[in-house]
Image (cartoon, rainbow, N blue to C red):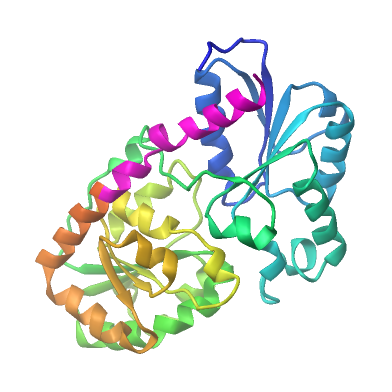
Amino acid sequence: MAPLSKYKSILVIRANAVSDFRMDLAARYLRRAGYDVETITVVPFYKAGQYDAVICCRPGSSMIEWLNCAYAAGTRVVIDLDDDFNATPKHNPAYQYTGAGNPTYLNELKKVLHHPGTVVTYASPILADRYKADGIVVPNCWDDENPNWKSKKLKRKTVNIGFSGTSTHREDFNICERAVKSVMERYPDTRLVISGDDQIYERFTILPESRRMFIPGVPYDDYPLVYRYIDILLVPLRDTHFNRAKSDIKLLEAGATHTSWLASDLPFYRNWGVGGSLVADGDWEQQLTFLIENKGIRALNAEQGYEKATYRAGSLVCQKWVEIMGELLK
């Protein structure tokens, strides 16, 4: 690739959502490649023509209006998507804003995805098929320059069973809840760790406080520290059209933090293939029991998962952003 000029400017627009880490990492590596990069969440209209290109994550209705101004100003646009908004379920808070509850928005999104001035990037390959718009897959990664991802497990006498997710995953957690309660009743040396959603945590108030722990949402840079408290990560996910467009990010996170996992048997988890076990809906208690009783298997899973995760480190994956922008702005 030819040397980059400093005057090439890029505006990276965050969505104020959990996927913003994609934008922050893209901005870091684009700066190192020689671009003048500004990262922003709320974008005034006068900025629409001030940059050579913009990268926009999960654009909402107001952002699409802004993007149309950017097109008119001749600015090149990259739109990054990590969910199938057309399939957003009704219980998801986004349904009325960026889901099927707002067909006007979905029509406007379709127009910008097919605009000749747009390059689309996706977090998973299936999204290109869902949106019927050609694009480039930039898979989710982990920040190998953040030392928190390399923090060791805290020493403890318990086997900690963990779940990390937002309120949108409450129905998914139903899949394994009964099994978790049964196993914790049978194994007093276990402890439950819930990160993110306090209502899922409240389902376990029958347990003494010494056997449960809640970790509220934390900034992305601190998020890896959650895994210091988890020995077995639970990744239940209902087999729905919306969920089948998800990525393997939870298993990636488990691998990066040397954490064994149990996950629903869905294609993208199956493709990851190492570091834990896939679980049919009726087998959570059996599989969880096996991991609790077999420390050696947990350790083997942790090492195999980490080895796989090294191939999805940010320092490798984010070079894709540099390639994309180099081609777009050459």
Q: Residue at x 49, y 45 (%)?
A: 220
Q: Which residues are magenta?
A: 308-330
Q: Up-down: is 79 above or below 35? A: below
Q: Up-down: is 239 above or below 24? A: below
Compared across the picture, whether 3 is left or right of 250 comes to right
Q: Residue at x 79, y 27 (%)?
A: 75
Q: Residue at x 23, y 52 (%)?
A: 153
Q: Up-down: is 87 above or below 13? A: below
Q: Compare residues 46 and 165 and report the one nearer the observer.
A: 46
* Residue 213 can be seen, yes or no: no
In the picture, which quadrant includes the C terminus?
top right
Q: x and y percent of residue 210 in the render?
A: 29, 71
Compared across the picture, whether 220 is left or right of 328 comes to left
Q: x and y percent of residue 76 in the render?
A: 75, 30
Q: x and y percent of residue 250 in the render?
A: 41, 59
Q: Compare residues 63 and 74 and report the one nearer the observer.
A: 74
Q: Compare residues 258 and 314 and report the one nearer the observer.
A: 314
Q: x and y percent of residue 295 in the render?
A: 12, 67
Q: Is residue 310 magenta?
A: yes
Q: Residue at x 71, y 31 (%)?
A: 54
